[in-house]
Image: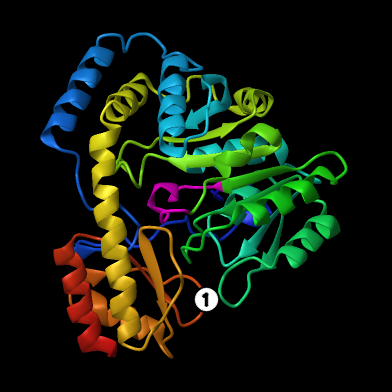
Amino acid sequence: MTEPTLPVRPELAGLEPYGAPQLDVPVLLNVNENPYPPSSTVVDDVAEAVRRAAGGLNRYPDRDFPALRADLADYLTRESGVPVEAAQVWAANGSNEVMLHLLQAFGGPGRTALSFAPTYSMYPEYARDTSTRWVVGRRAEDFTLDVEQAVAAVAEHRPSVVLLASPNNPTGTALDLPTVRALLDAARQVPGGCVVVVDEAYGEFRRAGVPSALELLADHPHLAVSRTMSKAFGLAGARLGYLAAAPALVDALRVVRLPYHLSAVTQAVARAALAHADELMAQVGALRAERDRTVEWLRSRGLRVAETDANFVLFGTFADRHAVWQGLLDRGVLIRETGPDGWLRVSIGTPAEMAAFQDALEEVAL
């Protein structure tokens, strides 16, 4: 009997699912995780919040989770100094789902999403999954954006969505507000409208004086600024991403979200963690300092290093970066082979983990 043919969409045929290598090695520095687990106090409070939520698991969770949105708005207000209201906040299972909601609401067949490479490798997949045309411009040699070229790309391609990571992944490059403002002004001129998304997944790691795009929210109803609890909060396993935008933009996302997409357990975990935001953020300063020490060490060894405001460092360049990556792996250190040819990316770990990385790199490539 002939096996039936599966009607896979042509653009998906033969593709492998996205994902960085998940290997059991002593030093994991490849997916930009926070290396510090929650304290026992946080764990106890999270467990108690889940216990309480478990008593009502026979009922669906609140579809629009107003209490969580209020807690997230309060956190953003304190972290950025920009007043944010609960009605301006949306959340989902990781910032990946937040981005997918944005493309579902504002992308689609006959529409275009625009970004500037090198940048986060999932962006074109969000576009593909929503049948949105994907167009990519180029960043400058130092991975900043050339404002005139970026504005010209918006005028040429007339996207419905512009995706800007700041700090950018995999380079760590942050955008200044004049650049974001210029792209917002260009987006206003796009017939039919254009949403500008500033992805601040690593925003809490930015250096002193580097602003958040949240400062532009009040005057730009077509701006969305996304964040995540995976990185600075050290809650990658909780899967909670969120954004701030004008209430009308948030309402458009509520239309495309699946019913009850945030479980009662996820909501409980996130709210319990937000109650400990100050404690969880205490490690951010240490990670910033370790990042800066890593940048200085790499440069002292004659390597090129991209300016970074994130919890990772892009460095190079190597004639055979895969050989360097494999050499580190052979010594128990897993980093990421990503970015432009010749470059590698290392997440910032504990001082002991970074010492292991440096020792391995000395043996392999220096």
Is 278 rendered above or below residue 306? Answer: above
Is 142 rendered above or below residue 50? Answer: below
**263 with respect to 44 (left or right):** right
Compare residues 138 and 320 and report the one nearer the observer: 138
Residues in magenta? 199-209
Name of the residue lying farthest toward the right:
191
How many labels were placed on the picture? 1
Name of the residue lying farthest toward the left:
40
**60 with respect to 145 (left or right):** left
Asked if residue 299 lies in the magenta stretch, the reply is no
Give how far across and how far down residue 95 sits, in percent.
48, 41
Q: Residue at x 62, y 27 (%)?
A: 250
Instruction: For mark 1, give the secondary structure.
Output: loop
Q: Residue at x 42, y 41 (%)?
A: 228
Give how far across and how far down residue 156 sits, in percent.
85, 59
**321 with respect to 159 (left or right):** left
Asked if residue 206 lies in the magenta stretch, the reply is yes
Q: Quadrant of the C terminus?
A: bottom left
Q: Is residue 4 visible?
A: no
**352 with respect to 200 (left or right):** left
Q: Which residue is denoted by mark 1 in the rendering?
A: 340
Q: Residue at x 52, y 49 (%)?
A: 211
Q: Amino acid at mark 1?
A: Pro
Q: Residues within 10 Å of mark 1 (few under 14, many from 20)?
A: some
Give how far across and how far down residue 143 sits, in percent.
56, 70
Give how far across and how far down residue 59 sits, in percent.
38, 8
Give the main secondary structure, helix, strand or loop, of the magenta stretch: loop
